[in-house]
Amino acid sequence: MSAPRASNDRPPGAGGVKRGRLQQEAAASGARVTVVLGAQWGDEGKGKVVDLLATDADIVSRCQGGNNAGHTVVVDGKEYDFHLLPSGIINPKAVSFIGNGVVVHLPDLFEEAEKNEKKGLKDWERRLIISDRAHLGNLSPANPLSSASLPALVPRLPTVFDFHQAVDGLQEVQRQAQEGKNIGTTKKGIGPTYSSKAARTGLRICDLLADFEEFSSRFKNLAAQHQSMFPTLEIDVEGQLRRLKGLAERVRPMVRDGVYFMYEALHGPPKKILVEGANAALLDIDFGTYPFVTSSNCTVGGVCTGLGIPPQNIGDVYGVVKAYTTRVGIGAFPTEQTNETGDLLQTRGHEWGVTTGRKRRCGWLDLVILRYAHMVNGFTALALTKLDILDTLGEIKVGVAYKLNGKRIPYFPANQETLQKVEVEYETLPGWKTDTTGARRWEDLPPQAQNYVRFVENHVGVAVKWVGVGKSRESIIQLF
């Protein structure tokens, strides 16, 4: 009686695949993508790091989120704002790819591209590829809200609003009225679009480009579902379908099968592939400060599911962190400074949201959340940005641990009420009281600034590869 055969052995003979070939193919798993992710609550300066790395990239991709992201990039004195387009599209030699994990609002996509065209962006339509599996944020209501439907304390929303955006706004109004607080979303309709996706009623780009009659039927059903939930929502369905039919032809040349596109990119001629994360670890739908989070996975797992690539194709994962901490909207913020220090950081850092224009809350650097982000993402190196904002401070505090009921806790609390109760343990470091914006090498930084960077490295256990001391590309110091 023969011994049982291992599952990856095949019997010899015609049609069989030799085991040696399988092993060779497994070893040749393809190229590895480089990933840039936010390590705090967003607004860390990911766009600048992506812009730096994109200069020699062949492909720059987005894997999650939508036009709720806000990345500002300064090139040759011109400031570009990106919300849905990968910020690497500035590189004229690179292809930009919007993956299936991104939710796409087509009118905003074209409007954003055209605004940046006026600033000097060229040939973007020939260098942009969109996954056919990406979900659409769609429909513009004729009258999303009647004034009578809103509490007097809530201002009326605009009358021409994206469908999912209108629902986003309505949900925020309801939360405010029922609970006395809202989530603080960007009102860009990202959550409702992901909700439609999870409920399996969403519409994808491949649906728009296939049978338009079938698309129209599903579109009408989706509109009716939302109108049944929000009776004040009025939608010009036929007008929207005409508009979408026109947009379909404009976007058609850019659409590809995203999984096959990435597979070819990984296994074809060698390419440098960069993945640009949106939002950040503490806004992740699973690992963030729920419910005050976004609606997608903006940690490293979202790269695989949002592009359709396996884990073995993940290479370096760079975490981007400010030299202090900011947060937009409400939710727990243990190191927040609602005092002169917070005001100074807000003013010097120009802390206003790119997407929303909202003032950002500011506080000391929190190494607890940074270590937590590293646990989830496995950073291979860090980019520490906006170090120059601390230039005027005589001393700088850094949050190094949390205490709960007087005892140190080794984890980051999941529950918001618990997180609100933690006591932050700080270490105080000397400031440098020197202008660092002209520094271009590590040696140019004052010793106290160098010590600050090394302090972060030692407490997190990850090397800092870049230090940012200004807005421009030239203001990023590379350490190794």
Image (spheres, rainbow, N blue to C red):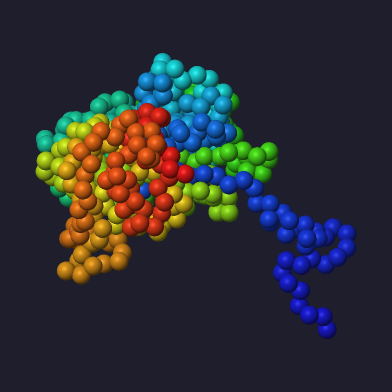
Q: Is residue 217 visible?
A: no
- Give residue 166's quadrant in the image: top left
Q: Quadrant of the N terminus?
A: bottom right
What residue do we see at 15% from left, 38% from top? Answer: 343
Q: Is residue 281 visible?
A: yes
What residue do we see at 30% from left, 66% from top? Answer: 410
Residue 405 lies, in percent from the top left, at 16, 69
Query: Please, which residue is most extreme toward the top here?
Result: 118
Residue 303 lies, in percent from the top left, at 49, 47
Up-down: is 47 above or below 312? above
Up-down: is 16 above or below 480? below
Residue 122 is left or right of residue 424, and the answer is right
Residue 273 is left or right of residue 449, and the answer is right
What residue do we see at 83% from left, 67% from top? Answer: 11
Residue 1 is left or right of residue 461, and the answer is right
Query: Please, which residue is most extreme toward the bottom here?
Result: 1
For the residue pair 396 and 307, the one nearer the viewer reads as: 396
- Give residue 340's quadrant in the image: top left
Up-down: is 153 above or below 11? above
For the residue pair 175 and 238, the one nearer the viewer reads as: 175
What residue do we see at 51% from left, 48% from top? Answer: 316
Residue 121 lies, in percent from the top left, at 46, 20
Up-down: is 69 above or below 246? below
Residue 4 lies, in percent from the top left, at 76, 78
Count of numbered circles on the image: 0
For the residue pair 161 and 110, the one nearer the viewer reads as: 110
Residue 64 is left or right of residue 258, and the answer is left
